[in-house]
């Protein structure tokens, strides 16, 4: 099913993101984890894609299994920073051949060695191209509630986001954030800029201290004091940190839904127990 139709028809949605293995050796354990997450009956699941295209085969295989065995609507990611037009066209055809109706079209992070392909400069260039090749596909795009790290002014980032939506993006998903006020402020600004597509709030449950160093630092997200205190108090104890992180993410989600942000995309990091804990915490709210 097309994700835009799900977002338009359901008042509240909970969806999960998984990532494919980097090597074939890791395939079975990742597949098991993604299947357990599919068993939670999310509104849809997204499957990420290595920026350099290294995971393309595994992304497609995980997406195909989720869709065809577990009957979950899938959002297959695709990046263009290291892909030429022929590779993008090949991936679009592959996704269509396995029944995927939704593509998350991203530029990808510029690799450290600076080796990029110049067929597309921005995600919006690829979105326009995919829209032309496959007018019926549902296309998602990324957005950044505190501005993308490469863009010094948020107002410029929002102007660029408007170009992305105008190029054919049906809905947006945000980068992780830990302070909901940032999200409310962002939504106010993008609506004022004429961006009207649905926005899924990207929520990352932080359940171990390493994640704070890696993902959170990379995202550039503001860390509220109460989040900092939580990691400071529980970061050394994996079980306590896990419980605290799930509760923090649940609190964020409840506040978002209460304030009208009703599409929640959880970066579940291939962890079925964490995805299940969040879903269970919201069981009545999701009914
Ligand atoms: P773009 O939309 O192209 O934006 C990149 C930068 O260029 C921004 O600073 C923007 O302001 C600027 N810009 C855009 N258009 C213009 C223009 N016309 N003129 C001037 N400047 C412009 N990475 C992966 O490798 N694999 C994944 O699966 C993946 N999934 C993601 C999912 C989500 C929900 C999010 C939020 C991010 C994801 N990423 C993923 C990370 C993403 O690839 C990086 O954040 C990347 O640096 C930017 O990608 P983008 O699609 O937002 O790029």
Image: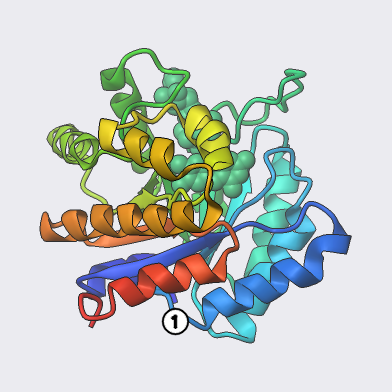
Query: Residue drawn at (71%, 66%), measured in percent from left and top?
Result: 30
Residue under the image location 31 percent in, 19 percent down: 156
Which of 228 and 256 lies nearest the eye of the viewer? 228
Residue 160 in the image: state x and y as whole percent: 36, 27
The number of callouts visible is 1
- SS at circle 1: loop
Pick the front one: 122 or 183: 183
Q: Nearer the viewer, residue 229 or 5?
A: 229
Residues 159 and 47: in front is: 47
Q: Is residue 264 left or right of residue 45?
A: left
Q: Quadrant of residue 133?
A: bottom right
Please tell me in which quadrant of the rendered image residue 283 appears: bottom left
- On-image quarter of the C terminus: bottom left
Residue 51 lies, in percent from the top left, at 67, 39
Q: Position of residue 247 (x, y in %)?
A: 33, 58
**Quarter of the image where one finds residue 155:** top left
Q: Considering only vertical position in the picture, is 113 above or below 91?
A: above
Rendered position, 117 above or below 140: above
The residue to which callout 1 is attached is 41
Colour mapping used in the image: rainbow
Q: In this rendering, does residue 136 appear at all?
A: no
Q: Position of residue 157 (x, y in %)?
A: 34, 24
- Looking at the image, which residue is at 74% across and 44% down? 53
Left/right of residue 195 with respect to residue 59 in the rendered view = left
- Is 115 positioned to the left or the right of 242 in the image? right
- Up the image or down, 48 lies above or below 93; here it is above
Looking at the image, is 190 positioned above or below residue 110? below
Answer few, some or many: residues within 10 Å of disc 1's Cα (few below 14, many 20 plus, some between 14 and 19): some
User: Residue lying furthest right in this view?
Assistant: 25
Using the rendered image of the protein, determine whether residue 183 is visible from the camera's viewpoint: yes
Query: Which residue is found at the position 44% from the left and 77% from the top?
Result: 1
């Amino acid at each position: 099913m097309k994700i835009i139709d799900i977002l338009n028809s359901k008042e509240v949605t909970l969806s999960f993101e998984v990532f494919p293995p980097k090597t074939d050796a890791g395939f079975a354990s990742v597949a098991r984890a993604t299947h357990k997450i599919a068993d939670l009956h999310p509104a849809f699941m997204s499957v990420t894609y290595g920026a350099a295209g290294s995971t393309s085969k595994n992304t497609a295989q995980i997406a195909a299994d989720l869709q065809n065995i577990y009957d979950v609507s899938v959002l297959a990611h695709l990046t263009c920073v290291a892909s030429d037009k022929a590779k993008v066209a090949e991936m679009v055809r592959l996704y269509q051949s396995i029944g995927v109706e939704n593509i998350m079209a991203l530029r990808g992070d510029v690799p450290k060695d600076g080796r990029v392909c110049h067929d597309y400069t921005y995600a919006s260039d690829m979105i326009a191209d995919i829209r032309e090749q496959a007018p019926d596909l549902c296309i998602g795009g990324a957005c950044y509630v505190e501005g993308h790290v490469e863009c010094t002014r948020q107002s410029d980032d929002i102007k660029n986001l408007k170009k992305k939506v105008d190029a054919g993006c049906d809905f947006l998903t945000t980068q992780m954030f830990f302070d909901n006020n940032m999200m409310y402020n962002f939504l106010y600004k993008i609506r004022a800029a004429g961006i009207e597509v649905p926005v899924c709030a990207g929520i990352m449950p932080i359940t171990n201290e390493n994640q704070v160093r890696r993902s959170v630092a990379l995202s550039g997200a503001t860390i509220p004091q109460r989040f900092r205190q939580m990691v400071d108090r529980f970061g050394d104890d994996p079980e306590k940190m896990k419980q605290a992180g799930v509760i923090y993410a649940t609190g964020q989600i409840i506040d978002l839904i209460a304030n009208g942000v009703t599409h929640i995309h959880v970066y579940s990091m291939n962890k079925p127990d964490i995805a299940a804990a969040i879903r269970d915490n919201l069981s009545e709210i999701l009914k």
